[in-house]
Amino acid sequence: MSTKLAVQEKPLNTQEMLCPCCGGPVARKANECRCGARFVGEPLDESPIKVQRLGPAMTSITLLALVIAGSVIVTKWFALASVFVIWSAARAVRLAKQDSDWYGGYKTSLATLSLTLAGSLAMATYGVAHIPKALENYRIRQIAATQASMHHIAGLLEDFRVNVNHGAYPSPQQFKVIMGGSLPTDYWDSSIKYQPDFDRVADKDLGITMLSNTSFELRSAGPDGIVDTDDDIIMRDGIFFTNAELKKKKVVQPLR
């Protein structure tokens, strides 16, 4: 057995350590070994080195940045994903508080959590305050869609009056033919009702009085689906009226 191995097998006392170069025993306080190797620092103890993990904290920050970017670039509804940011930041805070040696970023995670909670509260307050306005805008879009459909029908009726029926609007039977056999529907999938208005026209040569469709009415039952209520959408000769206005002016009889 070599001398070097024999030296390694020799038990060491607490004041000695093995030389990392030759493997021989050397006093811990010595500056160099007999083999000439010099020591540049204190030997490491056997306790494990702990490196703080910043993954949970950085994950919460990354999620917050993604939510903010998505809300600004894509849609404001992306802000609902802030619930994941809150969960991630709360988890990072809990881990850093329970074991600060292994998990770092406590202050960063706490700031991320506080910022996200404050932003979520502000967004929730803003959303609740604008619910009535959002509902009103939705109602306006419904009405606008129905009015657009009525404008299209009115254009077809006017074309028929000018080019086909010699100045008179079509009868209800002719109207169905114009619309392809089925009545058009409003936003709520209810049929838009059509009613021509008859005027008596005297013919001096023939000595008779004829009826002529010189005006028309289009009516949608509105959101409630019931005709002759306040939410009816009514077009009279290309002009929109409310049901109350028509009743006041007594322009036409209500549709049944």
Image (cartoon, rainbow, N blue to C red):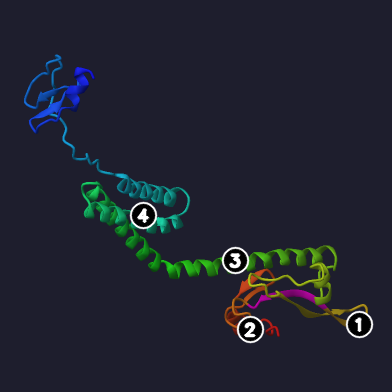
Mark sitting earlier along the chain (4/1): 4
Magenta stretch?
212-221
CA gap between label 3 and label 4 equals 39 Å
Task: Please say if the residues under marks 1 and 2 sit with CB atoms less than 8 Å apart.
Answer: no
Whether residue 220 appears in this view of the structure is yes
CA gap between label 2 and label 3 equals 19 Å
Mark sitting earlier along the chain (3/4): 4
Q: Which residue is mark 3?
A: 144
At a point 19% along the width and 18% down the height, the residue shown is 3
**Residue flagged by tag 2: what amino acid is it?**
Asp
At a point 19% along the width and 22% down the height, the residue shown is 6
CA gap between label 4 and label 1 equals 86 Å
Q: Position of residue 243 (x, y in %)?
A: 60, 80
Mark sitting earlier along the chain (2/3): 3
Element on which disc 1 rests: loop
Q: Which residue is mark 4?
A: 85
Picture quarter with the C terminus = bottom right
Element on which disc 4 rests: helix
Task: Please say if the residues under marks 3 and 1 sit with CB atoms less than 8 Å apart.
Answer: no
Q: Residue furthest right?
A: 206
Task: Please say if the residues under marks 2 and 3 sit with CB atoms less than 8 Å apart.
Answer: no
Picture quarter with the N terminus = top left
